[in-house]
Image (tube, rainbow, N blue to C red):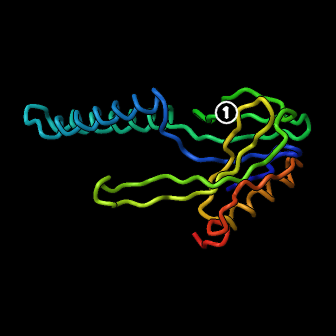
Amino acid sequence: MRLENYKNGFYELKLGAYFRGFLPTFSGFLIIGCGLSLIIIAKSNSIDFNSKVYSFVFIAILIGILVNLFMGIEGIEFDMNTRQFRRYKKRLGKKIGAWKSLEPYKYLCLSAQYNSVGGVPLSGGGHRHRSIEINLAGENVKSILLAECENYKSALKDIQKLHNVLNIEVKDFVIDQYTKESPR
């Protein structure tokens, strides 16, 4: 987890790239289409060499613009001067997201999440993947996922950083002793 103080009273929790929703999916299909047209242009014998080069350059620029435009960066900003936060998506260098008050959120919660991964149902294959989530939660508000950690020790370090910044009570809902002691 990367929690950075980038201005007096402003903290940023960078979550990384995301590929969810209509625009990133659409841009992915568009990039695939550009790649296929690039292959067709390269294989075509009826087009002269100079127009092939210009086509390559044009498609490469188009792909770069589309990736930058539609593949965004997600994060959460905290303004501790006004006790507000916003979940943002960064597109073309601009952070887009509405500010909300931190007041209804009273807890930082640790919880273990288990997900079945892979395997054929009747063969007994596959395994369960465990992660520790850190959520911002409160009464009558939807909780907000702040971080997902591989093990309990790293989750404790991360939640302590958040507690120091947000000054919100920490609740530990990880009750499985194996999860708390496991190196993974």
Find residue 98 and report its horizontal and vertical position in percent: 73, 26
Find residue 100 and report its horizontal and vertical position in percent: 79, 29
In this view, the residue in front, 19 or 105, is: 105
Q: Residue at x 66, y 42 (%)?
A: 75
In this view, the residue in front, 65 or 180, is: 180
Q: Residue at x 59, y 62 (%)?
A: 150
- Identify residue type, mark 1: Lys
In this view, the residue in front, 94 or 158, is: 158
Q: Looking at this rendering, what residue extends furthest in the left direction?
A: 45
Q: Determine which quarter of the picture holds residue 85.
A: top right
Instruction: Work out which quarter of the rendered image holds the C terminus and state it.
Output: bottom right
Q: Residue at x 48, y 39 (%)?
A: 19
Q: Residue at x 75, y 63 (%)?
A: 157
- Give left or right: position of 74 versus 28: right
- Give left or right: position of 104 versus 75: right
Q: Determine which quarter of the picture holds residue 92.
A: top right
Q: Looking at this rendering, what residue extends furthest in the front direction?
A: 122
Find residue 52 and report its horizontal and vertical position in percent: 21, 36
Tell how many labels: 1
Q: Looking at this rendering, what residue extends furthest in the right direction?
A: 81
Q: Is residue 128 above or below residue 81?
A: below
- Residue for badge 1: 95
- Give left or right: position of 156 versus 151: right
- Give left or right: position of 14 versus 25: right
Instruction: Work out which quarter of the rendered image holds the N terminus and state it.
Output: bottom right
